[in-house]
Amino acid sequence: LPAVSPLQIRRRRLARLAGGQSSQPPTPLSTPLTSPQRETPPGPSHALALSVNAVTLATSPVGAPGTYQIKTEPTHTVAVDVDSGIENMEVEDGDRRDKRNLADKDPSSSSAPEVSGEQALQLISRILRVSWKEQGRDVIFLPSLATQFRHSPKDVYSDFKDLIGQILMEVLLVSTQTRVDSPVASLTATSQPIAASKSPNRHLSLVPPSSQGSSPMLSAPGSLGPSSLSSLATCGGPGSGSDGSSDRFTIETCKETEMLNYLIERFDSVGMEERKAPKMCSQPCVSQLLSNLRSQCISHSVLVLLGTLTQPRPPLQPSLLVPYMLCRNLPYGFIQELVRSTHQEAELFKQILTPVLLGLRMAVKECSFDTDNFKYPLMALAELCEIKFGKMHPVCSLITSMPLWCPDALSPAVGREVQSLSYLGAFFSLSVFSEDDPRVGDKYFSGPAITMENTRVVSQSLQHYLESARGDLFKIVHSILLNGETREAALSYMAAVVNRNTRKAQMQTDDKLVSTDGFMLNFLWVLQQLSMKIKLETVDPSYIFHPRCRLSMPMEETRLKTSMEELKAWLAELHDSPSKFPDPKFPTECFFLTLHTHHLSVLPACRRYIRRLRAIRELNRTVEDLRSSESQWKESPLARRHREMLKRCKTQLKKLLRAKACADAGLLDENLLRRCLQFYSMLIQLLLRIVDPAYPNVTLPLNTEVSRNFAALPEFYIEDVAEFLLFVVQYSPQVLYEPCTQDVATFLVVFTCSQSYIRNPYLMAKLVEVLFVSSPSVQPRTQRFAEMVENHPLAVKQLVPALMKFYADVEHTGATNEFYDKFTIRYHISTIFKSLWQNAGHHGTFLEEFNSGKQFVRYINMLINDTTFLLDESLESLKRIHEVQEEMKNKELWEQMPREQQQSRQSQLTQDERVCRSYLALATETVEMFHLLTKQVQKPFLRPELGPRLAAMLNFNLQQLCGPKCRDLKVENPEKYGFEPKKLLDQLTDIYLQLDCARFAKAIADDQRSYSRELFEEVISKMRKAGIKSTIAVEKFKLLSEKVEEIVAKNSQSEMDYSDAPDEFKDPLMDTLMSDPVQLPSGHIMDRSVILRHLLNSPTDPFNRQPLTESMLESGTQRTHYPGVLPA
């Protein structure tokens, strides 16, 4: 035969292919092609380089009948496993063999039973569902190939790969004709496309095309194909809770979809063939043929996705593959093979996969937890990211190379930008919080018959949804981190999320500037999973001071112990020697990213939850007040205004209750809270290692010198733990029953007993508050945890003295509202003391502290101060309440008052009631503590600097309860305010009897302001009348009164004897005779009891405000005798 050039061969064959398409149309098929099947992933394909540079298929002038013309821009080379008959047909006709069997094609199969060429052709025809012999049902007749086989069967193909390529290309080119003539369209019309259903019971309708034979353009942002995702059909399973066309994903109805349907089903048919005849398909020759079929399906799918056979698709239009992936109907291994075939050509891979990634992002933006559609984009992306070849994850590399991976900030709303604009932001944005996505609350929590049980069940379902979504998010991020070339990009993105959301830690912030709570909690969950297996030995505790630390830590951030100036000097010293810092490792970076994410996610969400509960209580109170007072305003000119206010309050209340139900599902998730507790346990271990390298064998007290590493740590490292514990104890106490709780108990004991390690008294107060709320008297469900703290070996000897010291130290916190803050803090400490008093181990520590402790006297002094103020304020507010109530009882006088005055008085009544309840609760606690302490020990209360003040306080309150104006304390429903006058009188008189001795009697008698014989007689009378005390106790009190009267008579005589004493014999502050004079460093002489009493409240010289302590007082003076010194 004469030599024929490769170009001539190609032209002949393309002419045959193009010229045979005008034959009669194929017979319509009546049976479905395949139903979606799972199969084992295919092995590697044998790649052939298919170049599609400026491809033009034509053998006659453009536009002539019977021709196919396909043009593409010469921008890329497709390195895929394909032989379509376009480029790699350059073989000599003489090279073709007459005997065509698979054994000849694959020498490695010579030892296997020979499969004839005819059998191989039948296998190809059956899998591809084509025929070139005759037309029939369930097959696509290929007239061009039939003509070639009739005229020159030996010249049709060089090998089976060539034949497969010709078949697929002819089918695809034919499908570019009108729908009437398209065999693929006819096939689709009579069978179920592979993407048409998720299961046999769910079908996906195709949407009418916008124009036949072309790829519809993207109609609007957030759409897939010609319609929005929100109106698409779902492939979701039962329980999605939606119906109709609004709950489905759709695919475009276009020529490319017809082609893809065919190619995907042919790919699936290979697997079906392998399952039907596993022995035959295991033969090397057959296996090679099946591999070629797979690779050719993938290669031609690439051409379809690029638009090579029709027209190029816009780069921002979602890929045709997206709906298939969302409906989970691609054969297993199809996407993996697609990635394998294209990832080595960067530009081609980008052109194929970028529209897929953008389509998934677009789809997830339309999703919500009101259905289960959310899981499909997440699952699809997770599976894409997990595809790897060796150690390389190609899709991960592509994602991080996209401009959307971590875009630069464009506005002050950097936190919201990283959520809205970054690629993964859309996936992390799925949320159950009503502020983030109102659809969840509107669907699940807006019905009229919502019950507690329904809410609980719905919350559990939503939590399962969250767990599923977060699991896929973790797979995505984990794959990107596992991929060596993308790990840096992943860490940079995570650091950007944290650094751009630092405003979320503020107490008041603009939510529009930061990421949502749902986004941050999803992000937190992923980081928690990454940190779960980190060993603390691999974490560098000084990472935040590292020059290469990814986290932005402003110098103004409050530190545990270091001032800003000290911090600057220390950091300058550190950074002068960079060699001191080891290179940061992944465990360290991941740990600190997780720590800072907790600070910006779960804690702001907790604060929002508490604010919402407070708002609900306020609205409930307002609604109740308006309803209860309706009889007063319904006939007034303000009736319409009040009715509108009532309506608004009810509407807002429903909205807040719906938001709370959503937050219960999103925040009160025990799995989430347990993971937070476990991570905080790791943080606690790290902090304890810093303060005591001997951890876990920590000893107290800690080293007096605070290490710089600890002192320079941000204050929120400890505050966040305390704040989280406060939330958990109150709203989800069952979470505390975890093995890591022992570390939490150690943390609370160590830092509560180490006040020198924490500069901020309010941070110490938060630790105390945790002990308070976990006390069994406050939260019975945390009894086991409270016992763990109380019985901690370090707590038995250290906790009581530390709390007593803090009780006194909190008198001066440096804050503007320190005066009122101290009462709450001391109330917490008093409650803790009552609990510890019941513990045998702490009981002994109490007694030791009573007898010789340095802090006990200061503690008693502050207790006296608080009791004096709180009881005084409480009883005064009761008097004001009594006054208004009496006015309101006199209806005639009340009606005569102007309406503004009535409203003013009612407002004042409400304010007084709130103050009274608060102060009476605090006062009752301090009186009970006095009652408890004076029963066990008396000596400290009789010290010269304490006894007179205690007696004066008791006398004053007796006068309030039993004096001439005691009737002013009579109010309606006293139990509403916690006012129990009989109990209070009983406790006060008990304290008198428990301290009964000559010294205390003298202290009572010295009180000239409140004490009187008539007062004590009235007290005795009321106790007898009300039966408050036994007869014996009343008689004891009477005897004490008589002793006091004797001392009063002596005092009167002494005053007469020394009434003309010179001023130098009198105390300069109190103007009383000095019995034990001492000299101050400033030269002034004072009575010892007076100056010691002053030092208990303020450690300064009263004359010049200079620091002063008891040790600086000098007892020996020039005078050897002072008149008026009374015997003790």
Image (spheres, rainbow, N blue to C red):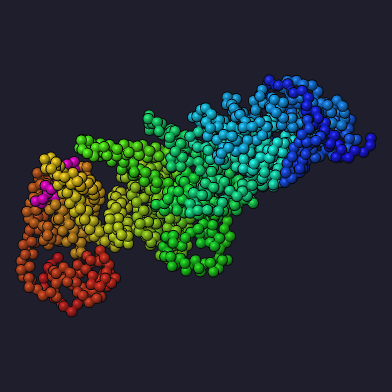
Q: Residue at x 47, y 46 (%)?
A: 516
* 517 is higher (above) or lower (below) than 60: below
Q: Nearer the viewer, residue 832 or 526?
A: 526
Q: Residue at x 34, y 51 (%)?
A: 769
Q: Which residues are magenta?
A: 961-974
Q: Is residue 1127 magenta?
A: no
In the displayed structure image, the side of residue 109 where residue 304 appears, left or right: left
Q: Which residue, as the protein is rendered here, is positioned at the far right? A: 1
Q: Residue at x 21, y 56 (%)?
A: 869
Question: Which x, y percent locates residue 645?
Answer: 29, 39
Q: Quadrant of the C terminus?
A: bottom left
Can you tell which quarter of the image residue 734 is in?
A: top left
Question: Which x, y percent locates residue 41?
Answer: 68, 36
Q: Is residue 962 magenta?
A: yes
From where the camera sits, is residue 635 visible? yes
Question: Which x, y percent locates residue 776?
Answer: 33, 45
Q: Nearer the viewer, residue 141 or 697?
A: 141
Q: Quadrant of the N terminus?
A: top right
Q: Residue at x 72, y 44 (%)?
A: 73
Question: Which x, y percent locates residue 329?
Answer: 62, 32
